[in-house]
Image: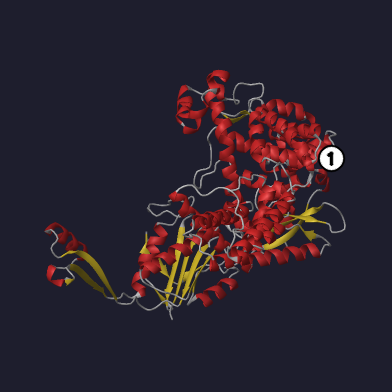
Amino acid sequence: MPQLLLELFSEEIPARMQPGAARDLERMAADRLKAAGLTYDALTTYAGPRRLTLVVEGLPAATPDREEELKGPRANAPEQALDGFLRKTGLTRDQLTERDGVLFAVISSKGRATAELIPEMVDHIVRGFPWPKSMRWGSGTLRWVRPLKRIVALFDGHIVPFEIDGIASGDLTEGHRFLGSGQPFAVKDFADYRHRLEREFVLLDVADRKLRILEAAQKVCHDRGLALVDDDGLLDEVAGLAEWPTPILGDMDPRFLDLPPEVVRLSMKVHQKYFAVRDPAKHGLAPHFVVVANVEASDGGAALAAGNSRVLSARLDDARFFWDEDLKTGFDAWNNKLKGVTFHAKLGTLADRVDRIAALAREIAPLVGADPDQAEQAARLAKADLASGMVGEFPELQGVMGGYYARAFGQPDAIADAVRDHYKPQGPADTVPTAPLTIAVSLADKLDTLVGFFAIDEKPTGSKDPFALRRAALGVIRLILENDVRFGDFETSIQDWIGQYFAERRALPGFAAADAADFAKLRARPEVAGARWVAAEYGSHGVVQALVAHSTPKDILAFFADRLKVLLRDQGKRHDLVDAVFALGDDDLVRIVRRVEALDAFLATDDGANLLAGSKRASNILKAEEKKGLLPAGEPVALTGAPTEETALIAAASAAATAADAALAIEDFAAAMRALAALRAPVDAFFTAVLVNSDIPAERDNRLKLLGQVRAIMGRVADFGQIAG
């Protein structure tokens, strides 16, 4: 079947925009083809430094004829309704058909040649393309990321003629700006297009450009006994900078190797787009770099390498200046600067935040096996590097530079490591700290962020999360789970930590400046209604304090529950199992996850699935009886003449309760599930042989008590009513 080839050739497209552009081109083309009724076998897009390319395989020569039936008003409807329907369909009254008193319109449309639809599709894509930034040029009205030069549009090997803002479609494209022939050339189809581009030193596919960069960079390093420092992010970027990427090994002045390696690598990466190089036989970086050129130089790249070396030296001289100046300054001066930096108008300065983190880290330290004094000391140093010259130049190095400076100023390694790593984990792929001191400071940092912003009602809404609270909550969860941190009563701990916001002060930092309108909004919130008595004790800010003390712990716990569901769902766990465990009121995250894992494994068995069904049946019976009145109280007993299935379930329930309680006491949730599994057969037999709603009141009450007992036993492990299935 015919093939569509489209190329939009322009001046240089920024590398950071190319991946998104390829996705947008694919989406927009697919949407337009679908709207036109065109099917296809495959649709592929490519993005590079100077071109966006679309190839669609298996397009039909024309769209099919279509017949659509539209339901209209009733035949006896008012004339206005009928007139509106006729205008919509373009038909007359006698062209409508009537069925069961309702009018219908059958609209037939002839198919159109695909070649006629392509100009409309391309015009829509080009004029509506969602570039993050675009420009106009010349006297035209068209906007594109950079001036658009050519459009290749071929369908079934033939040019599809059209024009967009003076740019006519054709079959001509261009090769590499410097290495190519310099002359436009015609192409016939995608295979010919791709082959001719490679002959003109253009690699169309970004995957091919990445592979060329990686293999050639590794080779030039290997030839000198060196190894490339992998950097996937940089590889993605430089693959969008060159159509014919050519890695060249350059030399760096060895005197810069006494700078922190992160500084050297970031100077290379951010400013120059160079790859760092290491010596496999030694620790640390080697005095070399790899630059990816867009040409194959006649001298093997010697001149290019030398020029880039001089530029890198200038950059690293700047970095050395910041390093030397920072070593003359120190933590006291930086922390003093933080007093003048606002963290948030309602949460005070960065210095206020440091005070809160330090107090919280001291509280958390014993819970994670860290020394409280060291935890407080590390927390007081953790944010200081934000005022340093190096972090001002390279914000990405916050924390990292603090660790280096802490060591330089004689702090113990444990404190320096805590300063360096306290931001971790910053994402789902980031490593989780395991050192107790680092855990304490990292938890304090993230919990201060969460408690503070929840306290001032700056919670995430929808997709908006300007203060990265979701990331902070996920970081807390991962720190707790992966280090098996046990807080006991997490809600009480949250409540206690909130209390630190008010220790020796009447309100949160910055609240004193809040105007009357802020307080009016807070007073209107329903959470405050039952806590206004606090105002008498705390003065004008009592409503705020009451709001925080009475609502924030529950809000944050619900937020943690939501984040935990996301984490467990990403791991393949069911969210309803998380709900079933959270319904117990447990807020120990480690215990919650263990319960969920045990419950998941249990429900995957036949015993678990069948017992869940039995539990739901028992629950439904009990709910129906509850609507009629109170359920009978007390324990079930073995009545004289009762069916053996009933007495067997009474005995099994008693044994299961004892076994489950013993297992739960030592947090052996797998054993607790096995205790429940023992109920499966007795429950099945009971429902098969026993009529719960007996005509004899004593039998009915006893059986309802028994079902209530079964529900209560299972409810000690999880709320099975929350589980789907």
Residue 293 in view in this figure: no
The image quarter in which residue 382 lies: top right
Q: In this view, does 21 lie to the left or right of 423?
A: left
State the residue lying farthest toward the front.
Answer: 640
Q: Is residue 136 above or below residue 27?
A: above
Looking at the rendered image, the quarter that the N terminus falls into is bottom left
| Horizontal and vertical percent position of residue 664 | 70, 51
Scheme of image coloration: secondary structure
Q: Is residue 384 left or right of residue 187?
A: right
Spot occupied by residue 211 in the image (x, y as percentages of width and height): 67, 67
* Residue found at x 51% / y 59%: 21
Task: Return the residue nearer the eye: 16 or 464.
Answer: 464
Is residue 623 visible in the rendered structure shown here? yes
Residue at figure coordinates x 31%, y 74% from the top left: 112
Q: Measured from the top left, where is residue 290 in percent x and y? A: 73, 57
- At label 1, the amino acid type is Asp
Q: Which of 196 and 593 is in front in this view?
A: 593
> Which type of secondary structure does the marked residue at label 1 adopt?
helix
Task: Report the residue marked by disc 1.
Answer: 413
What percent of the width, then of the height, locates residue 316? Answer: 74, 43
Q: In this view, does 594 lie above or below 458?
A: below
State which quadrant residue 115 falls in. bottom left
Q: Where 292 falls versus 201 (above or below)?
A: above
Q: Neighbour class for label 1 at 10 Å: few (<14), some, many (≥20)?
A: few
Q: Which residue is drawn at 53% across and 39% down?
A: 459
What is the tally of numbered marks visible in this picture? 1
Residue farthest right in this picture: 281
